[in-house]
Image (cartoon, rainbow, N blue to C red):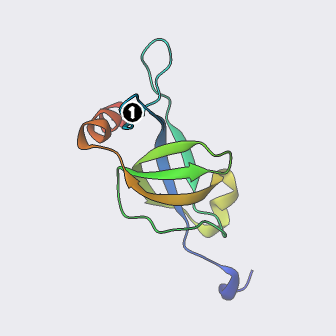
Amino acid sequence: MSKKGKYKVLKFTCIPVEMDANGKYQLKLDPAGNAKLHVWRIGKHTKGKYTGPGQLLMTENNLTAVILAAEPLAFKDRHSETPMQRFLTTSVDGDVLQAGLQLLN
């Protein structure tokens, strides 16, 4: 592929979130109280800009997830991860981010 068709690819480690009764985003936990980490990447048609950990993204299946970590991904390796749809301008509260980061480590 020519340089013109290439784009910067980042890989994101995320946890799905859901809104609680107060309209705040919380980590989506299974019945045992565990959250599952998922990985998505920037796609060619991804909308928005990445601002940092705690930011929300929307997957191509309309699932909302919080970004815990981002790392570069080689353009040639991009098909090993699922592309995301768009970045949201919303972020989770600091305590939710900290809980997610503890699960990441």
In this view, which residue lies farthest toward the right?
1
Residue 8, given in percent of the width and then of the height, sits at: 54, 73
Name the residue nearer the viewer: 66 or 37.
66
Name the residue nearer the viewer: 81 or 96.
96
In this view, which residue lies farthest toward the top?
32
Name above or below for residue 9 compared with residue 94. Answer: below
Q: Quadrant of the N terminus?
A: bottom right
SS type, badge 1: strand
Q: Identify the residue under disc 1.
A: 26
Name above or below for residue 29 compared with residue 104. Answer: above
Q: Residue at x 70, y 57 (%)?
A: 79
Residue 25, given in percent of the width and then of the height, sits at: 39, 38
Q: Is residue 87 left or right of residue 43?
A: left
Residue 67, given in percent of the width and then of the height, sits at: 43, 49
Quadrant of the image occupied by residue 47 = bottom right
Name above or below for residue 86 compared with residue 81. Answer: below
In this view, which residue lies farthest toward the front?
22
Q: Residue at x 50, y 60 (%)?
A: 87
Name the residue nearer the viewer: 56 or 82.
56
Q: Quadrant of the C terminus?
A: top left
Residue type indicated by callout 1: Gln
Q: What crowding class fits label 1: few (fewer than 14 Cα within 10 Å), some (14-19), or many (20 or more)? A: many
